[in-house]
Amino acid sequence: MAEQLPLDIPDKPKLAQNITHFARALRKAGLPIGTGRVVDAIRAVQAAGFTERRDFYWTLHACFVSRPEHRTVFAQVFRLYWRDPRYLEHMMSMMLPAVRGVQEDRKADAAEKRAAEALLDGVEREQPEAQDQEDGETEIDIDATQTASSEERLRNLDFEQMSTAEVAQAKRVLARLNLPVQPIASRRGQASHLGHRIDRARTLRGAMRQGGDLHQIALRQPKPRWPNLVALCDISGSMSQYSRIILHFLHTVSNAKGAGWARVHAFTFGTRLTNITRHLHQRDVDAALAAAGAEAQDWEGGTRIGDCLHQFNRDWSRRVMGQGAVVLLITDGLERGAPEQLEKEIERLHLSCRRLIWLNPLLRWDGFAPKAQGVRSMLPHVDSFRAGHSIASLEDLAVVISQPDDQGQKARLMAALTD
C-alpha cells in the first residue's frame, strides 16, 4: 500500500456522516456492508483516534473488508474519497467522454472505475455544450456509422479496467459461451450399421446362434474418445480480477451439455494448490464461486508457481490427466521461487498432457517481451501461448483447441529469447 499522507481535519468535522457516506460508496462498489458494520466502524474510529491516516485506513479496513477480493476496491474508494478534496471533479473528468489529443490519457487503476461509479451514483453529470461556430473555423463532421458497438467494445475490454456494470455484463456474455472440442482418434470400436470395419467376434457369435450359418456380417466404427479439460488458475494479487471472471467461464464450460469434454477439472494456486472441481459442478454460479473462494485461502497472496505445479504433478496428475487431457494454464508467469524448479515442473506437466495452453493477461501489451525469469523458464514447454485478458481472447480458445498446430505468440517470443 502506498504511503498515507496526513489528513486535513476541518474545523467542524462531520466524521460520522462521512464514514456513513463512505460505507454507502463501498456498498455500491460491491462490498457487503450493512448498518451494523457502519456503526462498528464509527465506534472503532472513535476508540482508535483520528490522528494518522494509516491508522484511520486500517481501522476502516478491519470493519468493512471481509474477503481478500474486496481489498482492491476498498483501497481505491478510500483513495478517491478521503485523499483529494476535489475527488468529485476528478472522477467526473474520468467518467465523461473527452476528445483525445496527442498525449495519452492515464488508464484507470484496478477497481478505480468501479470506485468512481460507486461515488458518482446518482450524481448528475454535465455534458459538454456545443459551441457556436465562429467565423473562420472549420466545421468537422464525424461519421459514427462504422464505430464499434458497445458489445464489440466490451469483447475487447480488459477485465481489469471494467466497471461494476461491465463486469456483470461480461459474466452474462461468458455464460453463453462454450468451448467445444473434437474427439480423439481411438482404436477401440463400437457396433454400427454404417461402419466400414468387420466386427469378427460379433459376426461369429451371431453365426453360432444360427447353427453356424452366416446370415449377417456385423460392422463397427471407431468409438469417439473425449479428452479431459484441466484448468490451473493463478489467484495471486496480480491475477485476482482475471481469475474471478475466468472461473465464471470455467463454470459455464463445466456445466455445458454437448461440449464434448469427458470431465472438467479446475485448480487454483497462489502459494498453495486447491482443487475446486466439485464446487464448479453446482448449477448456481454465485454459490459455486463463493464455495470455491471459501476453500481457496490464498486469494491475492503471493505466487509460488513451481511449488504448486510440483504438488499438482505429485498428487493429481495421474488422476486427472488421462484420456489425452488438455491443460489451460492461466497465469502471468511472475514467479518468486527458484526458476530451476519451475522449469522442471512445467516440463513434466507438458509431457503428461496432450496439449498445454498458456493464457497470459500480460500479452495485452503490444510490447510484451519475455524478460521475467518465470516466463523464460515456462515458455519453451507450452504448446500455445496466448492472451487471456478479455472476452475475445476467451472466445478464441475454441479455435485454439481445434487447431493442434496453433502456437499463438510462442514463435515470436521464442525468437526474442534467442536474440
Image (cartoon, rainbow, N blue to C red):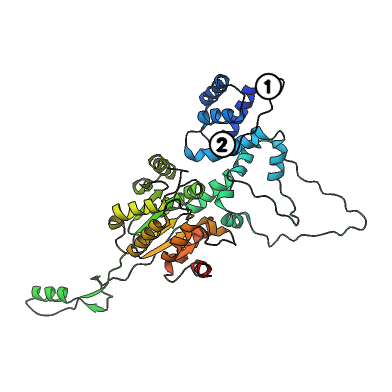
Give the residue at mark 1: 13
Which residue occupies the foreground of this view, 394 or 375?
A: 375
Q: What kind of residue is marked 2?
A: Phe
Quarter holding residue 59: top right
Q: Secondary structure at mark 2?
A: helix
| Residue at x 30%, y 54% (from the top left corner) | 314
Q: Report whether 72 appears left or right of 317.
A: right
Res. 103 visible in picture: yes
Closer to the chain start, of discs 1 and 2, is: 1
Q: How far from the left and from the top, in percent, is residue 85?
A: 71, 33
Mark 1 neighbour class, 10 Å CA radius: few under 14, some 14 to 19, many 20 or more: few
Q: What kind of residue is marked 1?
A: Pro
Give the residue at mark 2: 74
Q: How far from the left and from the top, in percent, is residue 131?
A: 85, 49
What is the total number of numbered labels drawn onto the structure image? 2
Q: Report whether 43 appears left or right of 204.
A: right
Res. 33 visible in picture: no
Locate the N terminus and report the quarter of the image it occupies: top right
Q: Is 338 located above or below residue 385 in the figure? A: above
